Image: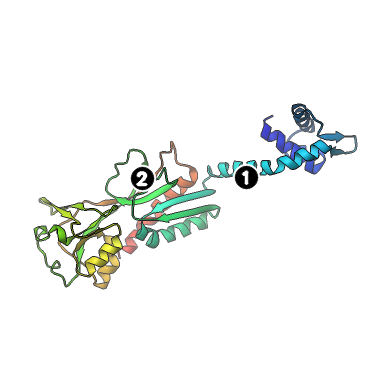
Amino acid sequence: MNDYKALRTFLMAAEKRNFAQVARELDMTPAAVTRAIAALEDDLGVQLFVRTTRQVSLTTDGAVYAAQIQPAFEALENARKDVMNTHKADHGRLRISAPTWFGQQVLPPVLSGFQKRYPKISFEVSLGDGLVNIIDDDFDLAIRISAAPSDKFTIWRKISVVKRILVAAPGSRFADMQHPSELTPDDCLAYSGESRRENWVLFDGGGSTSISAGRAFSANSGEVLARMAADGIGVALLPTFHVAEHLQSGKLVNVLPGWTPPDLWLTLYYPPYQSLPPRIASFSKFFEREVPGLMAHDRG
């Protein structure tokens, strides 16, 4: 018998004072309970119980030992349950990193729907537009909107294509452009996780052109870029779902519609698990099923 089971048997016997009842509750035979207690007494070199034909009672040493090990055993039992629960689809904690706008606008109904289905799963959600180190920062998964993943130290799942468009204020000099050559690097508002420049590659079906963006302005927030563009400061290249409300309200218009950049991907990233823990796999399947419809709704 392992130490954990022996201690559990002893503590229950200390509580019940009846080996037969302990045997029934632990699905053991009375003889097995007696052997377990005897083995523990031999190991400790003390008598833990006084046994008579009528009752079982703790010795002084037994009472002291029970009082001392009870808190440690409860901590061990809680840790055991926590570890076992992390390998269940409907138990455990999920620590998620998500982009700020996505986390505010799209993620809440996904989390609410999932938690209604799995109420014993708890969440910790961290929002930010910079890339996180999913391993060092102890995330179970990260939601990203980016180009094709190149990280060799994580695993990932593509959820859906994210299209982008060029946008500017309707009354600005950018609204009636016919060709990307009319843009200078100072006109292009760059999205950068480290607030640096980015390179825009645009295709028109017959060729491509490249523009260096962010010489005058860059930010790691799509909402900041959208508002700067709406103020006539320049042109921003942003996901369609991100600017849908601005387009509907008339604060922004799609410029150079014949020129398109490569698509981005909405992607789930994970630490390098050999296989996804069940709680993460169940959330990923739910996310993959629910999010495309929410994204389509946000695109208007």
Q: Which residue is mark 1?
A: 78
| Mark 1, other Cα within 10 Å: few <14 / some 14–19 / many ≥20 | few
Q: Using the image as rendered, state which of residue 121 and residue 14 is in the foreground.
A: 14
Residue found at x 53% / y 44%: 86
The x and y percentages for residue 206 are: 10, 51
Residue 164 visible (yes or no): yes
Q: Secondary structure at mark 2?
A: strand
Q: Is residue 207 above or below residue 295?
A: above
Residue type, mark 2 in image: Arg
The x and y percentages for residue 34 are: 79, 31
Q: Nearer the viewer, mark 2 or mark 1?
A: 1
Residue found at x 29% / y 50%: 146
Q: Is residue 272 above or below residue 190?
A: above
| Mark 2, other Cα within 10 Å: few <14 / some 14–19 / many ≥20 | some
Residue type, mark 1 in image: Asn
Q: Specify which label sits upstream in the sequence, 2 or 1.
A: 1
Q: Is residue 242 left or right of residue 179?
A: right
Residue found at x 16% / y 73%: 171
Q: Using the image as rendered, state which of residue 297 and residue 36 is in the foreground.
A: 36
The x and y percentages for residue 205 are: 13, 52
Of the 4 image quadrants, the one containing the C terminus is bottom left
Q: Using the image as rendered, state which of residue 278 and residue 97 is in the foreground.
A: 97
The x and y percentages for residue 273 are: 43, 38
Q: Secondary structure at mark 1?
A: helix
Residue found at x 20% / y 64%: 167
Residue 19 visible (yes or no): no
Q: Which residue is mark 2?
A: 157
Q: Are marks 2 and 1 in contact (CB under 8 Å)?
A: no
The part of the image, by quadrant, that contains residue 59 is top right
